[in-house]
Every structure is written in structure tokens, then in C-alpha cells.
Amino acid sequence: MVFAEAPVPEPGAGEIRIRNRAAALNFFDILQVQGKYQVKPPFPFTPGAEVAGVVEAVGEGVTGWKPGDDVLGIPEGNGFAEQTVLSAAKAFAIPEGMTFAQAAAFPIVYHTSFFALRDRAQLREGEWLLVHAGASGVGMSAIQLGRAFGARVVATAGSPEKCEFARRMGAEFVLDYRDESWVEQVQSLTGGRGADVIYDPVGGDIFDLSTKCIAAYGRLLVIGFAGGRIPSIAANRILLKNIAITGVFWGGHVRLYPDYSTEAQTALSALWREGKLNPEVSSMWPLEQLPEAMKALTERRVMGKAVLTIPR
């Protein structure tokens, strides 16, 4: 990766240009740079899919936005830059009281967890929700949304500091997944029932073990494979407990249903105003230190969200 100058992009029809104040990192940014993500932009490219800043220019046909508006957005790449052009339909007003850093950290992880828990799992009040990688960005959002939806939340994490972070995010119980007894602990906490919904962004062994502590009629949400190994499951396990293995590919859903992002952002902004969501930015770097920030994320040294700060 190199830090370089590029021409200022001009917004086309239906687009806006944002003068970025912050841009957030996601694990898939790393996979894209490595050429391992399902979406493979041609090299060379600028990664980055979450930004927040000020509208600087609007393209033909754009209504609802004008220069000077504070905005958060979900561009299709090119977010790690001083200025980013994106579709006006993928830009949203920053909720009152939210900083630029929090706004940049908000859309993808919270939209993903909203889609996962409300739509794919249809999480119900009083159900047990098990959230893996509870100190990650998606884990943080899943814990908070699980609580907002009335679930009882158990989280797992990989160190005492990360366990404490997950607890602070709202998990009722937190388990260290390095302790192999976490499966039995989930069973014990739920009175032998198991978790009704399991939120798994890790895959690998975590997925395999999750099938041992899922409740009958449970839903195991496949969020991603941060652990590296893409797991598989014997179909008889699905049959015997009447469980569902449910894919959560938020990006694919939004491409099929473009209006979904507005619906989700409206609901999530309301939960922010009610004090039920709090995107925590634990790590911040200046834009030119992006490689260091990505290395920290790769090495699991980030809790919550990592954000790049961009000067005016």
C-alpha cells in the first residue's frame, strides 16, 4: 500500500462528494487488499467502505443534500481518502450527538447485525443470543442490538480485556473462548436449553463447537470467517435438532433491495436516540498510517472499531 495523490473525483448523476473527516476499517478491507474477499476490485484500488464528513459537491439530479451537510456514507471502495464520491442513496444524515468518528464506525457493522438479528434470525424477546467475537466491531453491534431487541446475551472473547469490553457493551454473561469448557458453560447458563440464536463471525472451530450448544429450533448465523477456516457441517446435525444454518450477506441483500439501507438506518438512528446503541471507537490513526491500522486489526489488537482521522 502507498499513500499517493489522485485527482479530485467529480460526482456524477445521483452522486455526492464528501470531504471526509473519518473513515472506519472493517475486516473485509484486509481480505480485499489480500485478494481473498468475494468482491475483488481490480488492482490498483483504494479500499474503505465507511466514511463520515461534510458534503462538498452534489451531482445532477441529487435532492436532499447540499454542500455543508454532515453525512455518513457507505461507498463502494475509495473510502480511505480525503474525498470520496458515492451514491446519494448510500448517504445518511449523522444522528444528533454522534461524532464523525462514531458516524464512520456505525453503518456497516450495525446494518449487518440489524439484518442478521431482525431479519435473518427473527430474534425474539427473551431468547438466548450467543455472540462470538464480542469485542469486535460486529460483535459489539450484535450485543447492543440483541439487548435492544430484548434477548439475553452471552458473548465470547479471547482475553480478559476483551471479555471486559464485551461486558461493558452490554453482554449479560461473557466467556473466554480459549477455555474449552465454554460450550458447557453456555449449556449451563441457559438451563440446558442452549442458545436460540448464535452470531458467528469467526467460523472454523468456533462454528463446529457452536453446533453443540445450540438450542432445538436454533438459528446459527454465518456472518464471516475471521478465524480463517470455512467450516462445514454434517446435515444430520441440522436434522436432529431442527436447526437452521443461516447466511448473512448484508451486501448482497442491499444490492437486491436497495431501499433496505434507508429502512435500517432509520431504525438504527432511532435506537441511537434512545441510548440503546453506542459505537465505541477504541483505536484511531491519521489517514497516512492506514497500513499500521490494518496491521493492528489483522493482529486482533482492536476492540470495537478502528477509525482513520482525516484533517479538514
Image (cartoon, rainbow, N blue to C red):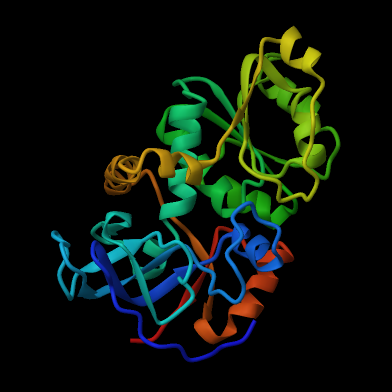
Q: Nearer the viewer, residue 63 or 55?
A: 63
In the image, is residue 152 above or below residue 159? Answer: above
**Quarter in which the N terminus is drawn:** bottom right
Q: Nearer the viewer, residue 134 or 211?
A: 211
Visible residue check, residue 170: no
**Side (left or right) of 214 relative to 270:** right
Q: Residue at x 29, y 73 (%)?
A: 17
Q: Residue furthest bottom?
A: 5
**Side (left or right) of 275 relative to 133:** left
Visible residue check, residue 115: yes
**Side (left or right) of 266 relative to 38:** left
Residue 89 image offset from top left, x and y in percent: 28, 54
Q: Nearer the viewer, residue 136 or 58?
A: 58
In the image, is residue 89 above or below residue 33? Answer: above
Residue 134 image offset from top left, x and y in percent: 62, 46
Q: Residue at x 78, y 17 (%)?
A: 235
Residue 272 image offset from top left, x and y in percent: 32, 48
